[in-house]
């Protein structure tokens, strides 16, 4: 079930963006004719890339879920040690291929460390699961850390010796936390937190790079001349998601019991029927991918709706270009008129051409129906008045 706080967060994040773009659209609704243009190859590449990456995040969120021993062996967290081992043995019977060829060390061998722990724990999936069960049986707080940060972070931060020393994660500072490490010793989960934040950042990085590349001047087209101005909105949405995710990561309690008692403060969605706040790492990863997919699709919609509008600077550039073209055309017309007036041969040909056009116009205006429509249209547009004013000014300049 989606928490109400999560819905409020989405509304707070998306609401201002939609409102600003709606008001901007009302102000510049007819400021551009770009919407009349068809989608170009650059537009198809842009929208196709956004949809493709959004579908990848959606697929990863729905199907490629992170490893979780409790889901694998169908056990609940904080169960007694013998229950976890029974669940692991039952899972090994169902999938005998995971059992190592060298066999499973006994409890006595583990206590005496008379086996190659690294080869056993890394050589098979059963050894990997057995290592986690050993950690949870020896250190109850490891279950809290595992559920908060996930298996990938837990294994990369704790399993460097693969159980050779069985050191608690809250006493991992060298030299007893002396010197520069004494500050970090006050934060027992700092190693897990830094690794989790780095992994989270690299999850957002492809989307940030994609929006940055797709909003360069090379991707603008006649359909979307203002695509480069959509970049800040995409960056704002992704950065907002990242810092929200970062805030939840650093403020969520490590203790699972505390998280469960304050469930309303954690705005995440569970990928299955398990508790979202209890399995925080899995639920946060699932929610992260869903929101990234939603963010990219929202950016696509916003780009399609707003990039066709031209800014005042773009309209001014178009106006300057059109004015320059009109100036060149006017200059050419002036030079042509002067050339005709200075050449007797050109004047004769011009007069002959004018007489031909006058005869053609007289033939057209001889139709009474056409003449009536022409007079009505000239009256509505006041074009006859402007033509007479232009003719009188030309005669004044020529001294006639």
Image: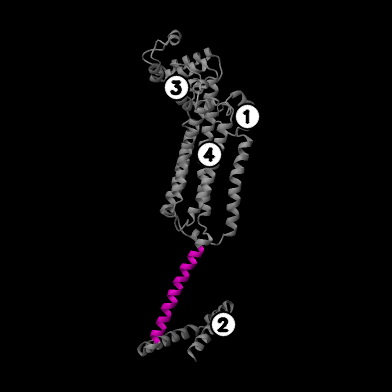
* Residue 395 in the figure: left or right of residue 339: right
Residue furthest left in the image? 345
Going from the N terminus, do you reach mark 4 or mark 1 first? 4
Q: Residue at x 59, y 52 (%)?
A: 20
Q: Secondary structure at mark 1?
A: helix
Whether residues under marks 2 and 4 lie with C-beta atoms below 8 angstroms apart, the answer is no
Of residues 386 and 177, the one nearer the viewer is 177
Numbered range of the magenta stretch:
315-340
Whether residues under marks 4 and 3 lie with C-beta atoms below 8 angstroms apart, the answer is no
How many angstroms separate mark 2 from mark 1 (CA)?
A: 78 Å
* Image height of 355 relative to 168, above or below: below
Can you identify the residue that label 4 sits on? 242
Q: Residue at x 54, y 44 (%)?
A: 237
Quarter placement of the N terminus: top right
Q: Is residue 32 visible?
A: no
Residue 330 in magenta? yes
Can you identify the residue that label 3 sits on? 159
* Residue 34 in the figure: left or right of residue 3: left
How many angstroms separate mark 4 from mark 1 (CA)?
A: 21 Å
Can you identify the residue that label 1 sits on? 263
Q: Secondary structure at mark 4?
A: helix
């Amino acid at each position: 079930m989606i928490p109400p706080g999560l819905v409020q967060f989405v509304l707070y994040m998306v609401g201002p963006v939609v409102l600003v773009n709606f008001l901007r659209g009302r102000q510049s609704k007819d400021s551009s004719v770009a919407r009349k243009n068809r989608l170009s190859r650059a537009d198809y590449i842009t929208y196709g890339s956004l949809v493709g990456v959004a579908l990848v995040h959606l697929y990863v969120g729905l199907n490629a879920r992170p490893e979780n021993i409790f889901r694998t062996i169908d056990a609940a967290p904080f169960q007694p040690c013998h229950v976890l081992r029974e669940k692991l043995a039952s899972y090994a019977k169902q999938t005998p291929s995971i059992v190592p060829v060298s066999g499973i060390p006994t409890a006595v061998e583990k206590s005496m460390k008379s086996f190659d722990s690294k080869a056993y724990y890394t050589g098979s999936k059963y050894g990997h699961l057995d290592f986690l069960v050993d950690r949870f049986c020896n250190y109850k707080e490891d279950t809290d850390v595992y559920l908060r940060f996930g298996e990938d972070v837990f294994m990369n931060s704790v399993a460097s010796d693969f159980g050779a020393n069985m050191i608690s994660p809250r006493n991992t500072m060298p030299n007893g936390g002396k010197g520069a490490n004494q500050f970090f010793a006050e934060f027992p989960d700092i190693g897990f937190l830094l690794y989790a934040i780095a992994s989270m950042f690299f999850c957002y990085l492809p989307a940030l790079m994609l929006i940055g590349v797709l909003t360069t001047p090379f991707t603008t087209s006649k359909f979307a001349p203002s695509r480069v101005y959509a970049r800040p909105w995409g960056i704002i949405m992704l950065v907002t998601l990242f810092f929200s995710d970062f805030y939840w990561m650093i403020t969520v309690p490590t203790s699972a019991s505390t998280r469960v008692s304050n469930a309303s403060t954690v705005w995440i969605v569970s990928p299955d029927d398990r508790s979202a706040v209890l399995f925080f790492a899995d639920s946060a990863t699932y929610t992260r991918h869903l929101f990234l997919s939603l963010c990219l699709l929202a950016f696509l919609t916003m780009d399609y709706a707003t990039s066709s509008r031209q800014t005042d600077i773009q309209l001014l550039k178009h106006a300057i270009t059109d004015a320059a073209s009109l100036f060149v055309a006017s200059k050419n017309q002036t030079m042509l008129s002067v050339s005709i007036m200075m050449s007797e041969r050109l004047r004769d040909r011009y007069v002959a051409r004018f007489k031909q056009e006058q005869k053609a116009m007289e033939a057209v205006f001889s139709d009474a129906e056409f003449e009536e429509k022409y007079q009505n249209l000239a009256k509505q547009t006041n074009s006859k008045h402007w033509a007479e004013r232009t003719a009188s000014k030309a005669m004044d300049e020529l001294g006639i």
